[in-house]
Amino acid sequence: MINRESVAGRIAKFIFLGTWLIITLFPLYWIVVTSLKSPGMIFKFPLEYWPTEISFDNFIGLFSKADFGTYMFNSLFAATMTATVVTLISLLAGYILARFEFKSKGAVLGAFLVTQMIPAFIALGPLYNMMSDLGLVDTRGGLIVVYIAISIPFSTIMLRGFFANIPDALEEAAMIDGCSRIGALFRVLVPVMLPGIMATFIFSFVNSWNELFLSVTLMNSDSNKTIPTALNGFITSFNIEWGPMAAAAVLTVIPTLVMFAFASKYIVQGLTAGAVKG
């Protein structure tokens, strides 16, 4: 009886997870299928769940008719620079908040948490005026600075949690052996915290890669626009270019999929971080 219930439970679990997987992956599958259809085949009835004639016209048009290569470079450059700077600053800030006690520590943590409760679009007007006064509107550097400022609070809180789970004895032992505090941080703690650092880097990268509102607000010229802005451009008042937009969406997803594929082991380790190997 127990075995029958166990088998029935496993079958039910398998059916549930399989159904959920299909529901989750179908939109991505349909985007890929749409990107491989010629414009006249996208709305053809009955619908084809796989095109009888595969066409790469949508992908070719992205680079021949639109400057999609520039958009990809802008997004990749902004996301990589943002993630790198945010990870380094948050690493140092998280270490200070985890290891040192000072009067304004509670206020700093509270301010970081409050910033996560404020929708970003509320500050678009004042932010645009400030960036305009600084001459940073429609520049890659200005967009990166804004992305860094937005990502640092949450990333700092995240890394502080990782530092809090590592015993002080590790760095104290390193300092007794002759390391400076900075040396102990980068030579002893950073290798132990690699899963958390990778998780923080990926979080900052993906947030910057997918961000739309700030990019649309601060970037005006085509040479500085990012991919989300380009995707938004396929939607006009009278038409939606489904084919090119689907092709652009496929190309947009690839970098994040590659990153998660290579860093998946670090992300999994980050979920169970806190254990210290002797």
Image (tube, grey):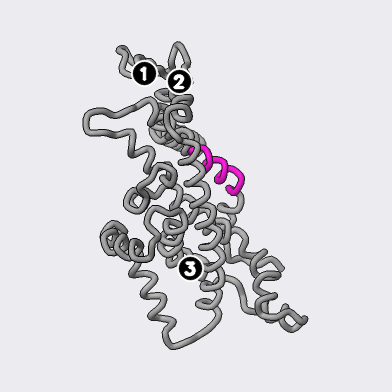
* Residue 272 covered by magenta stretch: no
Q: Which secondary structure type mostly characterizes the magenta part of the structure?
A: helix
Q: Quadrant of the C terminus?
A: bottom right
Residue 32 shows in the view: no
Vertical placement of residue 40 versus 210, above or below:
above
Q: CA distance from mark 1 to mark 3?
A: 46 Å
The residue drawn where x is 39% and y is 71% is 112
Vertical placement of residue 247 versus 118, above or below:
above
In the image, 43 versus 144, the foreground residue is 144
User: In the drawing, does residue 190 fall left or right of residue 131?
Assistant: right
Q: Residues within 10 Å of mark 3 (few under 14, many from 20)?
A: many
Q: Secondary structure at mark 3?
A: helix
Can you tell which mark lies on residue 39? 1
Q: Amino acid at mark 1?
A: Pro
The residue drawn where x is 64% and y is 66% is 190
Q: Residues within 10 Å of mark 1 (few under 14, many from 20)?
A: some
Which residues, given as a range, are shown in magenta?
Answer: 253-264
Q: CA distance from mark 2 to mark 3?
A: 44 Å
Judging by the rendered image, the residue that carries numbered circle 3 is: 156
The residue drawn where x is 56% and y is 65% is 88
Horizontal and vertical percent position of residue 102: 47, 87
Q: Amino acid at mark 2?
A: Asp
Q: How many marks?
A: 3
Callouts 1 and 2 close, C-beta under 8 Å:
yes
* Residue 261 covered by magenta stretch: yes
Nearer to us of marks 2 and 3 is 2
Can you tell which mark lies on residue 57? 2
Earlier-in-chain disc, 2 versus 3? 2
